[in-house]
Amino acid sequence: MKRHIHTSLALFAMLCTPLAAADKPNIVFILADDLGWSDLGCYGGEIKTPNLDALAGGGLRFTQFYNTARCWPSRGALLTGYYAQQIHRDKLPGIDGGGAQATRQKWARLLPDFLKSAGYRNYHSGKWHIDGKVLDGGFDRSLDMRNQGNFFTANGNSIDDVAVTPPADETGYYSTIATAEHAIDCLKDHAVNHTKKPFFHYLAFIAPHFPLHALPEDIEKYRDQYLDGWDTMREARFARQNEMGIVTTTLSALEREVGPPYAFPDAITKLGPGEVIRPLPWIELTDEQRRFQATKMAIHAAMIDRMDREIGRVIAQLKAMGAFDNTLICFASDNGASAEIMVRNGGHDPAAPPGSSASYLCLGPGFSSACNTPFRRHKTWTHEGGTATPLIAHWPAGIAARGELRHTPGHVIDFVPTVLELVGIEKPNDWNGEPIPEAPGRSLAPAFAKDVSIARDSLWWLHDEHRAIRVGDWKLVAAKDTPWELYDLKTDRAEQHNLAAKMPDKAQELAASWQKQTDAFTTLAQKDLADQPQGTSKAGKGNAK
């Protein structure tokens, strides 16, 4: 108890006092891609993730943290502190612009631009999927994994915004390992040449995003793990979550009518009779389908297992250079697990070993539902299954708690204000003479000291015409072309008991709040539409990453 009080007071004092460069915390944000809320061991999963579990055991797990339901909007929100729609990084109704190919306003700076003023070096390793060049965003070094269609080649990637030429023989190359190796190289160089400066490292793994590609020895560990099916897996994960105390809800029912968010019928034909496009009861599947689906889940697990081991190597480097104790390490996912099924890039060879470079497999709705246990729906939807993410926060020098839970709702828009507060940076009111609008994120620093609620008006979502708003414990949500649904998340984060008909006034109140924010974001986005490239509104199945 004494240590907890002492460290909490130290954190408070640090936030109120300008820090010397040597005292400023290093910051590492690790982002996974298409990871389900329950995929980590410390969130109820059976996949071996000892390094992330150790970070959770030595720090905090947030139980109600959110992303935007999709990759590129989450990344833009994470590094700017704004909702993606405010900065042209996702579509708004009635505006022909905004999406994966659109560009931020000049005032919508990325976090490294602000950290530079406090003496930070900034590094990026992995997926980018933010507009503009990486170094133009304030980073000093970068490995940009532009090739997201084959985990076994560096072809198409860039280092410091310059395209790489991979060797003729890429035997042994695997992008998850390469991402960690670049991060370790940056850290080693920092320890030698920039030891007096703090650093920010944005470590963005592509795993476990499709195509499901993994090393054969990693797949072998899980080959027969999932033959009992997604029903059994969901129940086992839910039981562990209850034992951990991280859920206060029922287990969602499988929605057998809900399949992939985008239809690619040709892909289903290429993938063969083992593919299943609905989360049917496991008992209804053929033996061939059960084996095919279990193999896909085994590859998904192998990808996460390998990512955790590579994270362990990065942690070992932080310890070796004496930086671990004063490094805030955060881990999250850009969206929930994915129900998508498609074949693109190099295509799919049914004769190739599953998980190899010649195969192109996606997780699909059955095991995606299990990975998102106990929540409903998947990536792209604004139901909890699409938007809920783990958040682990570990910082021995600044977080006294060990293995504690934090229940305050949070969002990736909160990362920038959290870091700015911890570092002692006051965000300017303008950028090169252009006013900077007020950002919606809130600092999570108070929750690092104890389990308190962070005051905010609401959390808001819109993607692919799926929409939602959360005010307190109330959530209003609707899938595209469907009526609003109202849920009390205090007891029903599984979104099983729609209260919209019983409480129409509450539903109307939240709908009005959602519309008010949407209108405000639209007004902001309309100010510089003329500066946007043409054809930026196709933020749907045309760019399904």
Image: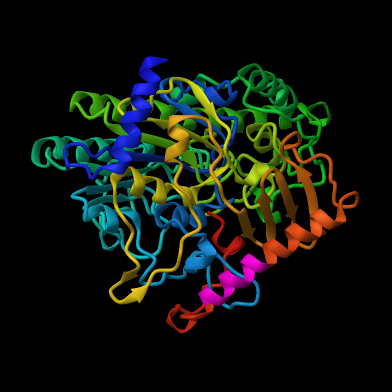
The stretch of residues the image draws in magenta is 516-525
Res. 441 visible in picture: yes
Residue at 32% across, 41% down? 15
Q: Which quadrant of the figure has residue 513?
A: bottom right
Q: Which quadrant of the figure has residue 11?
A: top left
Camera-side residue: 461 or 445?
445
The quarter of the picture where the N terminus appears is: top left
Residue farthest to the left, as pictured: 193
Residue 215 on image: x %, y %: 43, 30
Picture layout, residue 531 above or below residue 363? below
Residue 540 on image: x %, y %: 60, 63
Camera-side residue: 325 or 390?
325
Residue farthest to the bottom, as pictured: 530
Q: Is residue 386 left or right of residue 219?
A: right
Residue at 59% across, 50% down? 69
Q: Is residue 481 magenta?
A: no
Q: Main secondary structure of the magenta part?
A: helix
How many numbered markers are drawn? 0
Residue at 70% across, 32% down? 374
Picture layout, residue 518 above or below residue 356? below
Residue at 39% across, 20% down? 4
Camera-side residue: 435 or 226?
435
Residue 140 on image: x %, y %: 21, 53
Res. 172 visible in picture: no
Q: Is residue 341 left or right of residue 437?
A: right
Picture layout, residue 301 above or below residue 510? above
